[in-house]
Amino acid sequence: MTTSTERLLGDLRRALRDGGLYGSFLVRDLETGDEIGIDPDIELPVASLVKIPLALVTLERIRRGELDGATVIEVPPGRITTAGPTGLSRFRHAAHIAVEDLLYLTLCISDNSAADALFELTPPDRVGAVLHELRLRGIAVRHTMRELMETPVERFDPADVHLAHALAIDAGTPGRGHRVPQLDISRANTGTARAFVDLLQALWRSRPGTESAEPPTMPSAIHPDVAARVRGFMANNLVRNRLAPDFDSDASTWSSKTGMLLNLRHEVGVVEHADGQIYAIAVLTESRVAAGRQPGADALMGQVARRLRDELRSRWG
């Protein structure tokens, strides 16, 4: 590591600390395999990021003929009234939706009820087993999305939500256990920035005609048709307030998925530049500020990720 890179990483760690964030970052050049990160192997609860492997495995099972994407599922109303959940989670009446349309709701608007309808078809342990078959490691899938809706936030009045965030910040243990089960890495759905970058690399390297290429790592085990569908959903993600402002432009496209739970703020995605450069980016963070809405933290995540990407981009060619 060069002196300038060490200086950059030191500056970024200080910026995160001053902004009340603990961050795990990794940026990888998908053409060369070159990467740069900040604590990329720290395991954290992943919140809605688990919907990427859920969608991947659902599509793989459709490809194998184990599921029919046109099958219509009755989804009970979520009737959620607290801030955050979207789509069917807020419906007051049952809906009938095809499996493939549930995939769109799950990834593009992060609908928890749609995701749980998919988990009914493919339980968490089955999702984990198929990930293993596809040579994807480091992401643990242990529970459905319904359990994420049973945190202390639901027990406080809206004016007292900061108390739930204070509990999330203060009730952890040195071994990353937690009094809130959804934040305990031995019980929650978990992953690392590196594991999600590996997943993104597998999705973006799986394209027709790449079988004879010589990528910097082992070729993807994901079928090209499945990978293309997941990439398409991520490109149409509607939650774009976090990293998208730093990576989406007329000269680049940003495909991503966010995750948020209590003091957790995550986003993983791929930026594809018009000049051919492609970077996978994973940002998993914990806030040290007891507040629900933190636009400054979202902006800081994007700024740090962009500076890491810029460092790799400066080495290109």
Image (tube, rainbow, N blue to C red):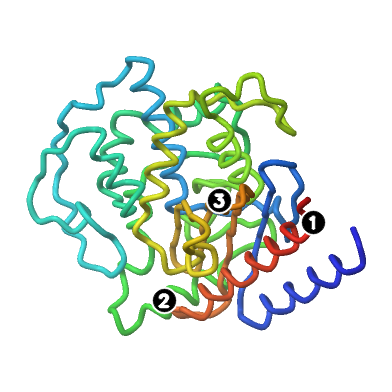
Q: Quadrant of residue 117?
A: top left
Q: Position of residue 258 (x, y in %)?
A: 45, 57
Amino acid type for the residue under numbered disc 3: Glu
- Give the mark nearer the N terminus: 3 vs 1: 3
Mark in front: 1 vs 2: 1
- Mark 3 → mark 2, Cα distance in angstroms: 31 Å
Instruction: Give the residue pinned by disc 2.
Output: 292
Farthest right residue in view: 3
Q: Residue at x 41, y 78 (%)?
A: 293
Upstream in sequence: badge 1 or badge 2: 2
Query: Element type at marker 2?
Result: loop
Query: Where residue 87 sits in the image (x, y, percent)?
Result: 22, 55
Q: Is residue 248 left or right of residue 275?
A: left
Measured as percent of width and height from the top left, residue 33 is found at: 74, 42
Residue type marked 1: Arg
Q: Secondary structure at mark 3?
A: strand
Residue linked to disc 3: 272
Q: Which residue is mark 1?
A: 315
**Spatial distance from mark 1 to mark 2, Cα to Cα?**
38 Å
Q: Earlier in the sequence, mark 3 or mark 2?
A: 3
- In the structure shown, which secondary structural element does the residue marked by tag 1 occupy? loop
Pointer 3 local density, CA inside 10 Å: few below 14, some 14–19, many at least 20: some
**Res 163 → quadrant:** bottom left
- Note whether residue 113 is visible: yes
The residue drawn where x is 53% and y is 75% is: 299
Residue type, label 2: Gly
